[in-house]
Image: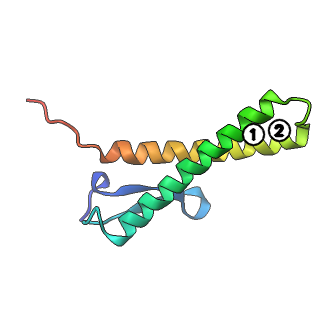
């Protein structure tokens, strides 16, 4: 039986927003590499979105209320993804054993 700390939290949600986990013995297996690739894409998209948000905030005259509302929703989604990636990676860090 696989314990919770042996499961990898994936950076996307399943049906109804529930977390998805990967049970894989190989860190370099196909599914683990796919999860790594998707995490990298999510982090890259969040970085690009942050740049776009900073530009929109600098040019207040060009951004209308609808644009800012959409931007806020996209930022919230990106933040959710980044936090899930950070949590997943934190869970996979080796924890030191103290005497």
Q: Quadrant of the N terminus?
A: bottom left
Mark 1 packing: few (<14 Cα in 10 Å), some, or many (20+)?
A: few
Secondary element at tag 1: helix
Give the residue at the far bottom of this rendering: 30
Residue 64 appearing in the image: yes
Residue drawn at (39%, 69%) of the image? 31
The answer to whether 36 appears left or right of 15 in the picture is left
Residue bearing mark 2: 68
Tell me where residue 52 sits by quadrant: top right
The residues tagged by marks 1 and 2 sit, at their Cα atoms, a distance apart of 6 Å
Return the x and y of residue 75 as percentages of the image width and height.
68, 42
Residue bearing mark 1: 72
- Asked if residue 45 is positioned above or below residue 22 in the image, the reply reads above
For the residues labelled 1 and 2, say whether their Cβ atoms are less than 8 Å apart: yes
- Asked if residue 58 is positioned above or below residue 11 in the image, the reply reads above
The answer to whether 30 appears left or right of 80 in the picture is left
Q: Quadrant of the C terminus?
A: top left
Nearest the camera: 4 or 41? 41
Tell me where residue 36 sits by quadrant: bottom left
Nearest the camera: 64 or 3? 64
Return the x and y of residue 19 as percentages of the image width and height.
49, 56
Residue drawn at (72%, 32%) of the image? 54
Nearest the camera: 90 or 44? 44
Residue drawn at (79%, 28%) of the image? 58
Residue drawn at (66%, 38%) of the image? 50
Secondary element at tag 2: helix
- Asked if residue 57 is positioned above or below residue 43 in the image, the reply reads above
The answer to whether 14 appears left or right of 92 in the picture is right
Return the x and y of residue 73 as percentages of the image width and height.
74, 44
């Amino acid at each position: 039986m696989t314990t919770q700390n042996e499961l990898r939290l994936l950076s996307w949600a399943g049906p109804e927003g529930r977390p998805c986990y990967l049970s894989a013995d190989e860190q370099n297996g196909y599914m683990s590499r796919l999860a790594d690739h998707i995490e990298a894409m999510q982090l890259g998209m969040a970085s690009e979105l942050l740049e776009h948000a900073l530009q929109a905030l600098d040019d207040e005259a060009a951004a209308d209320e609808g644009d800012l509302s959409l931007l806020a929703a996209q930022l919230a989604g990106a933040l959710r993804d980044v936090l899930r990636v950070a949590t997943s990676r934190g869970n996979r860090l080796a924890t030191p054993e103290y005497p």
